[in-house]
């Protein structure tokens, strides 16, 4: 998957192509194995062998095959040496013949001094960064990422060269690599993006891809009694209740705007998409909805979706924005329809000459609630801005000019939530939302370029978020949601996690739903109605008590801007889900880790108080149709029965769609445990392929495995070796511990 992504970014290594970029891979390396699950904590890998055999192989593959030109180091440490300056990692890059640049992660250099405690001063940290590998290879750290002020960085570098701590040839080698990447990208001959390129038009062309990605990533975990896809008339459904904090909110994932949810243009919520489907296909079926609770332990600022906003003349999809080339609404320059959830970063909006500008948005707001909600509405702002929000010509929120902004932290942490869980969202005003009500809305925004921009400090000059929170502040929000769902025929329960608990730095000691979401879920199950559990978030949810009771379960992960449409399409059968789990879902947090490729001794004994097996295993996923596999074959490029160095192993299998609808299937081939000088996992995925088949269609799936890239081990002498002996490859449905391994083929390495 890494090779596929980097190949696409680099256009298969055609870096000078106008549409190509230089892929940067991170975090190098073993960053995802932090102690206690804490971001940046010491790596808990078993040792150098695990790093070399498992953690580094994907990186090497992207460099060999994907056109990678940049490496970003990890915050964590390996064997008590911070990754940013770990000689083993730089040695690996040298051994691979890597020719690109190396960059620190954001503040990763300064952490050598302030967190890891291996540097005594800024100059010492910079010295270690430049000399991270050795003076022999001239490999080391090259680019800082918002660590030290530029004068500190330059002055320290000059002093280090003058006193001989860093050789000039080392710096020249580093600069040569950076310039080499720029040369490969064609930046010396064509350094700028042409003025003819429209970023908004380019973005619009990619919208269909966001829906395709969301469709293909959804995993169907349960589907009891063929609850899905929903067929309202055939199933005698006249009313559907859509309940939960993700029923009508956006959830892109971290680093996608505030809370991972903007820009809101060209996006969709579940409610929006479900209403559109029912209007077109079952107009007499009613959809009712309620948030019920917040997804985490505070009243968050949630973007108002664009479909609930319209221009003054009633054109849906956003408010009418008028942009002014000054900060006092004096020089109207252009108009466009949009939702006022924007982040302009360092630069002014397209078409304006400076960062001193102003905008007015006006139009209509349609309330989506099905019972009165005493919630919140407001405006979140970045630094150096001010705003006024009018509802029905009444000033509701006035945010004075602020140099710090009032946007809530994406991940406020337990120190915040323990104290502020019931407070209003910052910048929010109490507001009562009534079913079906349409309000006139007017928003004024002014941005001032008050400070010179320095690297990462104050780099976001202008940012605005028109938000609301539709959780009733009266304390009975769960009961109101239950009351709404009480007379529905079926409940779609949209729960999970947002950036505030599942983004970078949102480390968790538990893997359940938040307490309020659990209370809501428990209350809804007491209604004894079929519940379709729709999960979103960036981690597995250890909630077996809900998996076992739900009529159906789908996991949409962070589904992106088209997530609402994709989820609705799966619910109503417009798209047949075929995704497979990229990780195992544990029964409980105490059973971690639940790697599918565990060693036999890891499960020689079981827990006395809990099942050890994951609820759903890596590679698991259901479909609305059925498939059969036959004629599994294994051969090598040099022989049908043996293989050796330099060979490619080929797998083939016939797959047939034996069900009643078109769908996709993922063939999976695993290498089973074998006799080896080094203990081996019980199984290891070696090849997979996803195929799409119409009803009754049959195809032969071909998969390949590079022997030299994936089968050698580090032997007891820490030398790479392709061990002789038998290798058995099994065709499995997924990686479950009790998967049937009877369909297999064996080759002998000679």
Image (cartoon, helix red, strand yellow):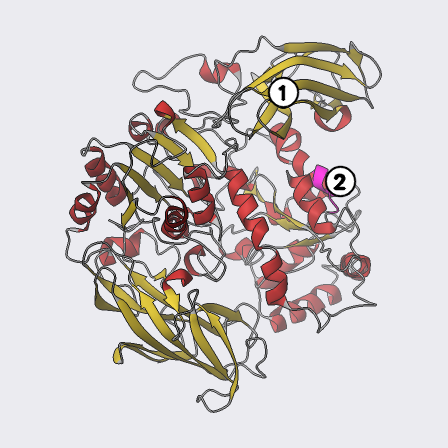
In the rendered view, tell whether residue 140 sits above or below residue 649: below
Please tell me which residue lies in front, 218 or 310. Answer: 310
Evaluate whether residue 681 shows in this view.
Answer: no
Which percent across, then down, holds residue 182?
A: 77, 61
- Magenta range is 60-67
In the rendered view, tell whether residue 219 sits above or below residue 615: below
Question: Main SS of the magenta segment?
Answer: helix
- Name the image quarter holding the N terminus: top right
Drawn side of residue 424 relative to residue 74, left or right: left
Q: Secondary structure at mark 2?
A: helix
| Mark 2 lies on residue | 65
Which percent across, then down, holds residue 348?
A: 55, 77
| Mark 1 lies on residue | 655
Which percent across, then down, holds residue 162?
A: 74, 67
Please tell me which residue lies in front, 355 or 742. Answer: 742
Residue occupying image coordinates x 71% and y 13%: 633
Q: CA distance from mark 2 to mark 1?
A: 28 Å
Drawn side of residue 363 relative to residue 215, left or right: left
Query: Is residue 537 found inside the magenta-colored segment of the image?
Result: no
Q: Earlier in the sequence, mark 2 or mark 1?
A: 2
Residue occupying image coordinates x 52% and y 31%: 580
In the rendered view, tell whether residue 589 sits above or below residue 477: above
Between circles 2 and 1, the one closer to the viewer is 1
- Image quadrant where residue 146 sits: bottom right
- Name the image quarter holding the C terminus: top right
Evaluate whether residue 157 shows in this view.
Answer: yes
Residue occupying image coordinates x 53% and y 70%: 345
């Amino acid at each position: 998957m890494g090779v596929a992504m980097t190949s696409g970014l680099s256009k298969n290594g055609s870096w000078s192509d106008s549409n190509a970029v230089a892929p940067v891979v991170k975090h190098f390396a073993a960053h995802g194995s932090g102690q206690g699950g804490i971001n940046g904590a010491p790596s808990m890998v078993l040792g150098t062998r695990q790093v070399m055999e498992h953690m580094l192989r994907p990186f090497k593959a992207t460099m060999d095959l994907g056109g990678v030109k940049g490496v970003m180091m990890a915050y964590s440490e390996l064997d008590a040496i911070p990754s940013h300056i770990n000689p083993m990692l730089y040695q690996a890059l040298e051994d691979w013949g890597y020719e690109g640049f190396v960059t620190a992660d954001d503040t990763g250099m300064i952490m050598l001094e302030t967190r890891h405690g291996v540097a005594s001063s800024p100059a010492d940290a910079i010295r270690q960064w430049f000399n991270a590998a050795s003076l022999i290879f001239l490999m080391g750290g090259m680019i800082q990422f918002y660590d030290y002020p530029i004068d500190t960085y330059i002055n320290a570098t000059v002093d280090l060269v003058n006193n001989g701590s860093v050789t000039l040839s080392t710096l020249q080698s580093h600069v040569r690599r950076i310039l080499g990447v720029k040369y490969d990208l064609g930046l010396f001959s064509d350094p700028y993006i042409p003025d003819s390129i429209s970023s908004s038009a380019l973005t619009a062309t990619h919208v269909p891809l966001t829906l395709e990605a969301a469709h293909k990533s959804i995993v169907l975990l349960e589907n009891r009694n063929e609850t899905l896809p929903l067929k309202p008339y055939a199933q005698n459904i006249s009313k559907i209740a859509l309940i939960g904090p993700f029923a009508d909110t956006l959830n892109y994932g971290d680093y996608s705007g505030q809370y991972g949810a903007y820009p809101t243009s060209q996006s969709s919520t579940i409610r929006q998409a479900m209403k559109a489907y029912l209007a077109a296909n079952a107009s007499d079926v009613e959809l009712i909805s309620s948030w019920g609770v917040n997804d985490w332990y505070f009243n968050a600022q949630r973007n108002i979706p664009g479909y609930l906003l319209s221009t003054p003349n009633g054109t849906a999809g956003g408010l009418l924005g008028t942009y002014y080339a000054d900060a006092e609404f004096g020089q109207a320059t252009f108009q466009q329809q949009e939702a006022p959830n924007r982040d302009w970063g360092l630069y002014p909006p397209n078409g304006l000459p400076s960062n001193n500008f102003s905008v007015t948005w006006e139009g209509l707001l349609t309330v989506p609630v099905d019972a009165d909600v005493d919630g919140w509405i407001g405006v979140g702002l970045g630094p150096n801005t001010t705003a006024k929000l009018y509802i029905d010509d009444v000033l509701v929120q006035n945010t004075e000019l602020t140099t710090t902004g009032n946007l809530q932290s994406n991940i406020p942490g337990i120190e915040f939530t323990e104290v502020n869980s019931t407070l209003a969202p910052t910048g929010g005003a109490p507001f009562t939302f009534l079913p079906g009500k349409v309000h006139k809305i007017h928003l004024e925004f002014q941005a001032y370029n008050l400070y010179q921009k320095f690297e990462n400090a104050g780099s976001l000059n202008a940012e605005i978020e028109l938000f609301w929170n539709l959780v009733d502040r009266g304390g009975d929000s769960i009961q109101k949601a239950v009351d709404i769902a009480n007379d529905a025929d079926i409940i779609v329960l949209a729960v999970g996690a947002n950036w505030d608990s599942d983004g970078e730095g949102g480390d968790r000691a538990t893997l359940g739903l938040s307490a309020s979401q659990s209370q809501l879920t428990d209350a809804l199950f007491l209604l004894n109605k079929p519940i379709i559990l729709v999960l979103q978030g960036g981690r597995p949810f250890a909630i077996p008590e809900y998996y076992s009771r739900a009529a159906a379960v789908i996991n949409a992960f962070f589904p992106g801007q088209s997530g609402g449409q994709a989820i609705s399409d799966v619910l109503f059968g417009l798209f047949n889900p075929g995704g497979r789990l990229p990780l195992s879902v544990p029964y409980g947090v105490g059973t971690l880790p639940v790697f599918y490729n565990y060693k036999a001794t890891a499960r020689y004994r079981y827990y006395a108080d809990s099942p050890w097996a994951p609820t759903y295993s890596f590679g698991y996923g259901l479909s609305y149709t059925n498939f059969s596999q036959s004629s599994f074959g294994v051969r090598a490029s040099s022989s049908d029965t043996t293989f050796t160095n330099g060979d490619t192993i080929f797998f083939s299998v016939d797959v047939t769609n034996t069900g009643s609808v078109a769908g996709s299937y993922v063939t999976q081939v695993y290498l089973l445990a074998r006799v080896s000088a080094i203990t081996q996992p019980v199984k290891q995925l070696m090849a997979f392929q996803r195929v799409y088949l119409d009803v009754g269609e049959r195809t032969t799936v071909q998969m390949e495995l590079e022997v030299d890239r994936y089968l050698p081990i580090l032997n007891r002498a820490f030398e790479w070796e392709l061990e002789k002996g038998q290798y058995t490859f099994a065709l499995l449905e997924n990686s479950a511990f009790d998967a049937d391994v009877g369909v297999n083929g064996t080759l002998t390495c000679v």
